Amino acid sequence: MLYGRTTEQERLERLVAGARAGRSGALLVRGEAGIGKTALLDRLAGTAVQDDGNDAGTAGRDKRNDAGAAGQHNANDGGTAGRDEGNGGGALRILRVTGVEPEADLAFGGLVQLLWPVQERLDALPAPQAAALRAVLGTGQERGPDRFLTGLAVLTLLADLAEDGPVLCLVDDAQWLDQATAEALLFAARRLSAEGVAMVLACREDGFAAPGIPELRLSRLGFEDSSRLLAARGRAPALRSQIITESAGNPLALIEFDAARRDQQHQHVPLPVADRVLLGFRSQIGGLPERTRLMMLVAAAEGRGDLPLLLRASELLGVGLGDLEEAERTGLLYVMDGTVTFRHPLIASATYQGSVLARRIAVHRALAEAAEDPDCRARHLLAVATGPDQKMALELAAAAERARGRTAYAAASGLFRHAARIATDHRQRASWLADAATLALAAGHAAQADRLAQEADELTEEPALGARLASVRAAVVFELGDRSEAARGLLARVGDAATTETADTLRTAAAYGWLAGDRDAVRAAAGRLAAGGRADPLVEGLERLCEDDAEHGLPLLAGFLAGRLDAPDGPEAGEQAVRMLALTCGALLGDDEAALDLASAEVRWCRSHSLIGELPYALGILTEIQVLAGQHRDAEAGVAEAEEIARDTGTSRRLARLGAVRARIAAIEGDARRVRELAETTPGGPHTGVECARVLLDLGLGDFESALTRLEPPPPGPDRYTWLSLSTAADQIEAAVRLGQPERAEEALRHFERWTRSTTTTPWAQAVALRCRALIGDRPEHYTQALHLHEKGGRPFERARTELLYGEWLRRARRRSEARDMLRSALATFERLRAEPWMRRAGAELQATGEHRAAVRMPADNPIDRLTPQELQVVRLAKDGSSSREIAAQLFLSPRTVEHHLYKAYPKLGVGSRQELVRLDLA
């Protein structure tokens, strides 16, 4: 029985009940050592099995019921995580893994424990996901670079298992999981929805961050519950109060302090409760025979309880299984089913920490020699390495390469770092530190990557390695938000003329400089490329734009863009950096069609190759273009997906640009409150998307002075040629005219017209330039020319604005019939875009022409407007004939979640099956 945990047990049982009903959920149980986390998990597993009519014991490590089951021991499978507690027929299946402190740096050590018993189900997964898990389990080849694919594969596997019945996944001591395992499990946990999977993680108070996962914090027991626990152990009432006071309500401390008093070993020491418990365990261990202590140290150092390995290592040390008898007799550990298990992790900690360094090294050396798995051997070599040893360093580097191949980047970085520490070859040492820095950055540890790169930089003078290290440090700075410093850091590492080794570095510096609005950095990169005879059309084009020379700069970019679109392997071929630069060119040229093709190809590439970590950035670019194309629902769905994936992968800081997309839509719709909220929460400078959206909102609401003065014209340089600043130029021109001060917009108009003259594939831009000229010069022929260009397609909102302005001019010229045609067309577009301020203006103008119509209202409810963004994505793919598994693979969901979204969407759309979706217009 557990004391004082009724509320906690009920919450956990509700989670399992939800899984039985087909719902999914995750919960993190957090608390100090000995507070009863494992006892709750054991109890949950036991009651779940009993509910299925199955009397099997719980899987995983039993740390004794430290929440108050009077020290009862439960027989178990000795730590064989992942045991199947139910097999088909709707029975609940339990998968369990326990983090082990010595394995915290072993790549995917925890995931191997969890999934080894169900590896036969991998064939049911999409090929990239199956390959990812086979690489983790060591039964397949190394795979691609996206470290988040493993988490998606775990999600899909859990969902597949749940097809046979509910799944309960228990993760104990999560603070000791290796980072790769933790990332995979948390990714899966955050995306659980309707699979019938319950996941419970338990961890100490510190050392395990799980944003987005609901938490259950365990408090210490009160006096009454503590007294009941001691009463169940037979402790007389007169002695309970002092034990309760000393233990401060920690269940494990209550049990251990009570046991110590019975053995006449207890002394009150003024230390934290956990430290006093640890001290008590050390005292118990110290009273054991020396051979027993050595055998216990072997078990503590090995960590997993692998009995065959322990016996091989102990033989090398001259001890054996019989030497554990005294430790078993006292209840400090037990041996069962080929596994050695400590009653509580603190006992293992006390064993290890209470041994002298020389003995710990000897034990790890024996374990390394006895290990058959090379990664296990590498883990023990880390503890043995105390000085230079090139042979050992090579082994650690080989283990790092294996970890890199499985995308366990944090583990790989650590192994390379340790290899470098003991390497005798200084050149190799610098190279391994560079590898460690690169992998630390890939794992999301920017500060650590910077320190490692700096350390490596001090050891080498090789240009190629120096350029590589400079790229790492620049990427760190870029990741932290200082793009200009990133560009200048790269420039500081290369000479005055580009070489084969530094040309790519200079291109990257130019890209960073452009994105930072640092024209000096772009100029410097272009000059050094040219000086080395390696002039680059893309960089040269960016340099010309920095000089405000659109006439020569834009054609250079157009040539680069055409080359990408005509690439033999398609626009998605080549390095991602090159593809991203092509997208930048599309935006700079205003070529929405090309940019949409490239962005769509990039998103398809990420989906088909399961590049989850890269998808949010690609979606961010795609949604910007979709807003310009009037595809607001698609853009909102893309933003929602990007934000969700970024949250689940811990990369939200990269997505500030998504705020611009939401703000642009809100500004068009006249939602001032939403724009204001986004302005307060989205970081960025004066010419960011949110600020530009505020200008558009001011214009739509008739606050022309604010629209004109909110932003100063950007100085010559990159900021002048973003789609944001170019669009805002047209907004401010209209604001100036409506204020009766057109002269205030002359400079913006000249800049906009210079840009449009240099682009040959942007009829919408030429149309907007003509509209602006018509506004300033009151020349109606410019309106008709603009409308002719608008007919070629692109940016429906801009076309509707041209129609509105021309309709207003026609009404003032008393050409009411022609005005009505213009205004009706404009109003129809504004209604489709839900552009309420613009609808009111168009409606008012129509009434002024004498057309009698009801007051302008929001358009009639469109069935697809009832769908959530994810439901919309799912039904569109289903309409195109994709199966649930195919949709799941594209959207990085589980098939069951896809079916759940379809189930929710059908009644909203008035259909009952996939076949009926085909008849719907879901545009």
Image: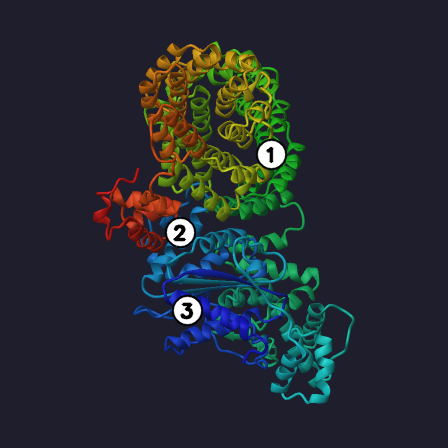
Residue type, numbered disc 3: Ala
As drawn, the label of residue 481 is 1
723 relative to 902, above or below: above
Left/right placement of residue 371 relative to residue 425 reads left
Left/right placement of residue 53 relative to residue 200 reads left
Of 374 and 808, nearer the camera is 808
Give the position of the C terminus as an image quadrant: top left
Of 182 and 891, nearer the camera is 891
Q: Earlier in the sequence, mark 1 or mark 3?
A: 3
* The quarter of the displayed image where residue 390 is located: top right
Please state which of the two labelled residues, at mark 1 or mark 3, is closer to the viewer: 3
In this rendering, does residue 557 appear at all?
yes
Quickly name the residue at label 3. Answer: 17
Q: Earlier in the sequence, mark 2 or mark 3?
A: 3
Q: Earlier in the sequence, mark 2 or mark 1?
A: 2
As drawn, the label of residue 153 is 2
Which residue does the image show at 68% across and 68% down from the upper left?
A: 274
812 relative to 95, above or below: above
Residue type, numbered disc 1: Gly
